Image: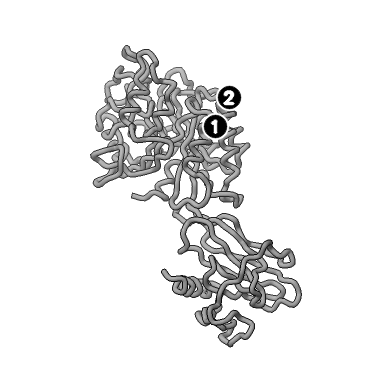
Amino acid sequence: MTTARARTVSCIALAFLTGLGGGACGSDSKPGGTAGAGAHGPSDEPPLPPDENDPAFAITGARSWYLVHNDLTPGDETFQIEVTPPPGVSYIDAWLDGAGRVRLIAEGPVQRGSIDLSAIAAGDHEVLLAADAKRTAFARLGFTRSHPMYLVLSTDWDESDNTDVQLQLQEELHAGHAELTITHLVGPYTFTDPAVTAARRAFLVQWLKGMQDQYDDEVGLHIHPYCNFVETTSVTCRHEPSLAYATPDTSGYTVTNESYPEQEFETLLLAADALFQKNGLAKPTAYRAGGWSLAAHNLLALASAGYVADSSAVNWARLEEWDGQPGATLFSWTEEHWSTMGDTSQPYYPSAADILKPGMPDVPVLEVPDNGALVDYVSADEMIQIFTANWPGGGLPEPRVLSIGFHPPNFNKGYQGRIDDTLVHVDQFLASADTGPVVYARLSELTKVWKQ
């Protein structure tokens, strides 16, 4: 697009929003369509930027970050300013990126203007403000247009119970990070393990519901196929293959999700849903497999059972603590099955033919890679490095996600410190604070951003 054409298109949009009408795009027009000798000449060139903004003009309303709208995040589609000029100023004009002069509207001592941002690209932009056709602007207002950078924090309930201390540590994370939401991926064995009393189950349910009510957390599902759960269904509990042991695991805990065929796995999912609902929780729609051991047929079962998002794809290279463990196959299994996943892997709808990539026909379950893994395997510095790899700064041309998390059964002050240090870093760039593009999100709601 030529400079002249870009100026014309921008001006028409800006004039519409400020109420000046198309006549404001003329070379020597003023509000009302009358000629103005004080306006710039035929080229209507933008003013020169100032060395520094003139403090005599009080400017409010301008932001540093404007998010691109999507169905999850409303975004900021309009640049709005109010200027209170010093005495003697007749009118103020604005230019977005050097194109399309727009006259602000005077309302008493204040002059107001709006600029539509919906069509401009992600990146750095600026608005110049000039008074009474001065050749040098009195203010230069820079801002960044960006898609959101989402942060998902999830928890994997590997065991049937969590101590009160471990629950309190999660509450403390909420207290320290006001916008934090957590996706609690809860195990159905909480409701089938005979070691957990009915009173304790009721307490855990009330705690989860309290997290939902107070912090808008999500409750999803996490399955390690413990026999105490599997045997409540028509499915026979498997003892192998185990991700942790060379010998059969008679508890079922470390056996892969993959080992359960599609129909059997769907039976387990529906049984888990029923347990959740029987105990006062809503049907979950987010999932992560125990040991990240999901295969394509498990994903098809998730779709049939009404799940919309999965986070079993893992950044396997970050699990190096398992590499070389005697009898353990977790590292080699994830390396083989999630071979393409890394620090910057992003959500996609997997092909029915290849779970590692999108393609048609696809499975209607959004795969949200666990690119930050869990705190057992990554330090705060590593999580921050992965965050930076996904958002190195500036405007994002598309939405992105960092997924991090932890296991509540082994959550301690050290692990809490890792998560807290990471969130302290991330909180420096919150969109709500106008300091960056970061937005906290729950796992299932990412389907509003990444649509099938």
Mark 2 → mark 1, Cα distance in angstroms = 14 Å
Q: Residue at x 33, y 21 (%)?
A: 255
Q: What x and y, as percent, mark residue 144?
A: 54, 56
Question: Is residue 164 shown above or below 448?
Answer: above
Disc 2 designates what residue? 414
Disc 1 designates what residue? 381
Q: What x and y, as percent, mark residue 26?
A: 52, 81
Which secondary structure lies at badge 1? helix
Question: Mark 1 packing: few (<14 Cα in 10 Å), some, or many (20+)?
Answer: few
Question: Is residue 171 shown above or below 16?
Answer: above
User: Of callouts 2 and 1, which one flags the residue occurring earlier in the amino acid sequence?
Assistant: 1
Q: Specify whether residue 397 is in view.
A: yes
Q: Residue at x 55, y 31 (%)?
A: 380
Q: Residue furthest bottom?
A: 34
Q: What x and y, as percent, mark residue 73?
A: 49, 52
The color scheme shown is: one colour
Q: What x and y, as percent, mark residue 347?
A: 38, 43
- Disc 1 marks which amino acid? Asp
Question: Mark 2 packing: few (<14 Cα in 10 Å), some, or many (20+)?
Answer: few
Q: Please tell me the numbered disc located at residue 321.
A: none
Question: Is residue 408 shown above or below 282?
Answer: above
Q: Seen in the image, is 168 located left or right of residue 385?
A: right
Q: Seen in the image, is 251 located left or right of residue 94?
A: left
Q: Residue at x 51, y 40 (%)?
A: 388
Question: Is residue 256 shown above or below 296?
Answer: above
Q: Specify whether residue 273 is in view.
A: no
- Which image quadrant is residue 41 in? bottom right
Foreground mark, 2 or 1, reads 1
Which secondary structure lies at badge 2? helix
- Disc 2 marks which amino acid? Gly
